[in-house]
Image (cartoon, helix red, strand yellow):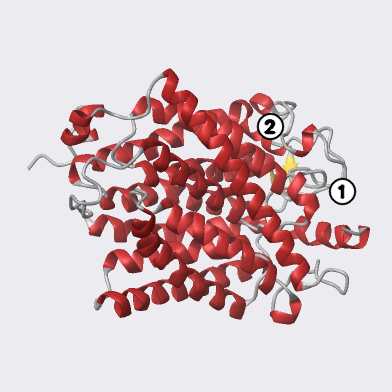
Amino acid sequence: MTLRKLAGLGALLSLVTPGLAMAADEVVLNSGDTAWMIVATALVLFMTIPGLALFYGGMVRSKNVLSVMMQCFAITGLISILWVVYGYSITFDVTGMEQGVVNFNSFIGGLSKAFLAGVTPASLTYAIPESVFIVFQMTFAIITPALIVGAFAERMKFSAMLVFMAVWFTLVYAPIAHMVWSGNGGLMWDWGVLDFAGGTVVHINAGIAGLVACLVLGKRKGYPTTPMAPHNLGFTLIGAAMLWIGWFGFNAGSAVAANGTAGMAMLVTQIATAAAALSWMFAEWITHGKPSALGIASGVVAGLVAITPAAGTVGPMGALVIGLAAGVICYFCATSLKRKLGYDDSLDAFGVHGIGGIVGALLTGVFAAPALGGFGTVYSEENSILDQFITQFQGVAFTVVYTAIVTFVILKVLDLVMGLRISEEEETVGLDLAQHNERGYNL
């Protein structure tokens, strides 16, 4: 990549990417930006609890509803503390990083910000308090491992889940986030990978980890011959609605300012989500004869996932195409592909988040081009749509390979040390009673 391309990329990403934790020039606090980012942070946390907890909780059988919700809540607490102790530092510490130079700090940050050293009410990131930026990014770190829960729902020990999430956050989430979002010197940042709000960092990362987890743990008892229908689709629809609303904080908040970029991110998020909901619904209607509530809810999430990496750089018509593509592609991957290959991705974490993230990340390279209504200023005579598409593919491929290998190793080691899976008897009884001695319903 030429210096001209790097300069253009830096100019764009410094405006629209939530990863640059250090301001280049003197920054003055902007109260409007700060107020918006506090709201956006609350919206993103709202996505996990209660949004994701209800979305996943409704899709499992009634004997496992509490276990899934419990996992979302426990992950929220666990990752919050790990983020404060070292997560923020190893993700956003830029010590030792240099643009165009690949070294250890291209892959992971240092510990100069461990235990939030040096963070005061007066310290700023962009034009907002650093404390607000820390919590905003914490909510991203929370929801990413929580998404993985959907792939192994109804069969993993709670203790093993906690240890797995702590290690996975440390060895997978933080390094990928650092490589994409930390600024000049980050491996994928220097490549020119565009990921506005987490298509690579959050969704491909979680989706691939979920696929590996469901393969390592194996299928649920009785799958696929035993009916395992969702026990409460009302919960799932409510959760999907909460995710849709909260996602405006996820995407529009990633501008880290109350500005035009945030406004456009909000617009394209709505367009892509609506398009994906409809395209999934009609694809299901055509192939199965009837549209389902579960289908439209899944389409909503697929659209939200796919527009995430593109939200700061594509225009309205690009968002429409991305949403339509995500709904159809994720529908067939979450249904036909899963049945054909026979893996038990319980709640379609890979089919929706993994596939949707890949679709969105790749199409970002196409529709961010100004010639197609986008706002990706990195495009020039020297960096064509094809060049950017190849760069996006490189980022996707690296994330898939890195996440798959490290996740597999973590799971295999934990299985040897403490075991991952509950017993057949516990699986029959359900995780609510077997792992928590509670019932979701006492009727």
Q: Quadrant of residue 236?
A: bottom left
The amino acid type of the residue labelled 1 equals Asp
Foreground residue, 393 or 307? 393
Q: Position of residue 183 (x, y in %)?
A: 78, 47
Q: Residues within 10 Å of mark 1 (few under 14, many from 20)?
A: few
Residue 305 shows up from this direction: yes
Q: Which residue is mark 2?
A: 89
Q: Which is more N-terminal, label 2 or label 1?
A: 1
Residue 193, placed above or below residue 25: below
Residue at figure coordinates x 41%, y 42% from the top left: 215
The amino acid type of the residue labelled 2 equals Ser
Verify CB contact (< 8 Å) between mark 1 and mark 2. no
Q: Is residue 27 left or right of residue 272?
A: right
Q: Quadrant of the C terminus?
A: top left
Q: Position of residue 253 (x, y in %)?
A: 60, 57
Q: Quadrant of residue 302?
A: bottom left
Q: Which residue is mark 1?
A: 25
Residue furthest left as drawn:
443
Residue 36 shows up from this direction: no
Foreground residue, 34 or 309? 309
Q: Position of residue 391 (x, y in %)?
A: 74, 60
**Spatial separation of the CA atoms under disc 1 and disc 2:** 21 Å
Q: Is residue 84 left or right of residue 385?
A: left
Residue at figure coordinates x 70%, y 75% from the top left: 374
Q: Position of residue 334 (x, y in %)?
A: 39, 60
Dot in front, 1 or 2: 2
Q: Is residue 354 left or right of residue 294?
A: right
